[in-house]
Amino acid sequence: VLESYWNTAVDPDPTHANGIDKYLNWVKEQKNVTLERDEFYTDKDCKKWYKDHVKTMIERENSINGRKYKDDPTILSYNIMNEPRCEGCGATLQKWIDEMAGYVRSLDKNHMITVGEDGFYSSEFSDEQHLLMNPGEWANDQGQDFIENHKGKDISYAAIHIWPDDWNHREVRYQHDWILQHIHDAEKVLKKPFVIEEFGKTRESGEPFEIRNRFMETAFMDAETNMRRGGPVVGTSWWNWYGKGDGRGDGYAIFSEDDSTFEIVTKHAKKMKEIAKKRDKKSDVSREEFNKLYGMFSSDGTVETLAGQTGEPGHKDGSPKSSQFNEPHGLALTGDGKYLFVADTENHCIRMVNTETGKVSTVAGTPGTSGDVDGSVNDALFNKPIAVAVPDHGRFIYVADSGNNNVRKVDLIKGQVETFVTKETPFGWIGNPQGIACDQSCEKIMLVDSGNSRILDISGGEVKVAAGPLDKGWENKGFGDGLGANATFSFPLGGALTPDGRFGYITSNDNCAVRKLDFKTTEVTTLAGDGTDGTRDSNNIFKEPARFRWPMGVAVSPDGKYVFTADQYNHRIRTIDAETGEVLTMAGWVRGFQDGVLISKDNGDDESFTAAMFDTPRGIAVFSGGDYLE
């Protein structure tokens, strides 16, 4: 590493700084001029001093073998700078990289050169899909751009660094997708070799080695898989070995006595050697082990956009490519899976999608006009309809009309809309209902009375409080299991019923939990979630509880074994074992709008690299055949 962006000096005296800070200090000392950090890349003195430093290093003689560094075969490569940054000035940084890479090459024709960066994608150079891969929007403006920075003729290979702790992405899934995205770009765009150059995982004193080891072994697994198929990966290196544990080093330090970690490193080194010799051709990781490593319900399957493919808000019926919605929320499928009904909230209407063709039509309401008017499906008005429920035969639809605080019924045979339950009830007004569900025949109907933090049984149009406070629910919010009125919720949102109507499942939004209601006993229990928002699946290496981030939509598999939820602010679809409460991820990982596979895989084709993304999913429905979700 010829230089570093970071000042890692332990001595607080600014005159003892290292990294680019020392150059800025020299300018101040000699010219009494204070430069901003980003001016390092354009200041003529800083550039001259950097070149002088580089020349001194490359011309330096190795004290052991007497060779100059430029002729020393024990040196593999040069990083021109460790993790450079130039906030909002990517073009400036790129010009500096090209100039300095060319200068290093002019001094040394023997050794390889790379940048030494994290591998962020810049808003100055990259498209929206690449920016979504960054660990956060902050990374868009750091100046780095993985593709642009490694294009130059003097850059021998591409490389990245991975810091899950520093980036607030302490998930092996994120690390996996970060690696595979860069493998794809190195292979398909740059057409250069690729190295996972620096990566690691912090480990606190007394923390189990298993956590750090999992991050390392999954990164190694990605490298091995790519090398087996002849991809661009040519090596890995990790941060960092500190020898004997004498108290030195940062949280990433790996010490000689960390036996379990070095066992993984040694195993990986042997595998890479065998793969390079074409002796290791098959991964020893099974599909089941792969799913477990990444907390996936299944790693097989795809996500595709059925309707509204433009991703733009509006109202337009027709084909999947041209149709538009405006804040669609609740979903419901007919028993044969042929028709999907959508509560198109901001269009104030109910839409229908033919799941075989993707064709969209408006079945009730006047697009863009809100109100509370019964009558024909063409004349009726809704006010922010937010959830729908249908029986298997699909001849009518129940609608949670949130803005009107009531429930509407759409009879598709008669072409009429009527108010099924008014806002005034014997238990006070309904308040902003967000969820509705029914059994196969809609004899049992459950309404999530969100504003009152309670669950209503509205079967046959008669209102009963199934769980939660009988009155003034806004004053009695909470997170408590129990029987009937003794149970408490905090702004519950989505609801789903088992096909026989015995059990209801409710996403209790503010509780960040999924609750279960037994309609026979009125008992409410918590199926998953502990009241704290988070991203973890069950059985994670951190030994943390499975958590959600304000889940909304919820659905039940036809056999009642699994509960699915649209986990809004994790931008994921999660699955919960209805018996054990085990939570796993079904699809999604970072916020975005992209079709693709459930998790990126390194099969060498574009499709396998592209993982599906969701942007705040709110509704979910399960086909009775059990083989796909809407």
Image (tube, helix red, strand yellow):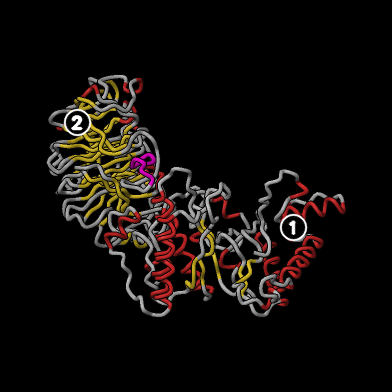
Asked if 119 appears above or below 167 in the picture, the reply is below
Pinpoint residue 265: horizontal percent, then vertical percent: 44, 62
Q: Secondary structure at mark 2?
A: loop
Chain part drawn in magenta: 542-551
- Residue shown at the point (36%, 50%) measured from the top left: 572
| Closer to the eye: label 2 or 1 | 1
Q: Which numbered tag is attached to residue 458? A: 2
**Do we see residue 572 in this rendering?**
yes
Give the left or right position of residue 277, taking residue 254 as reference. Answer: left
The image quarter containing residue 103 is bottom right
Q: CA distance from mark 2 to mark 1?
A: 69 Å
Q: Name the residue type under label 2.
A: Ile
- Is residue 199 found inside the magenta-colored segment of the image? no
Q: Does the magenta portion include 548?
A: yes
- Residue at the spot of label 1: 40
Q: Using the rendered view, name the quadrant where residue 465 is placed.
A: top left
In the displayed structure, 337 sits above or below 436; it is below
In this picture, residue 62 sits left or right of residue 123? right
- In the rendered image, which quarter is residue 221 located in? bottom left
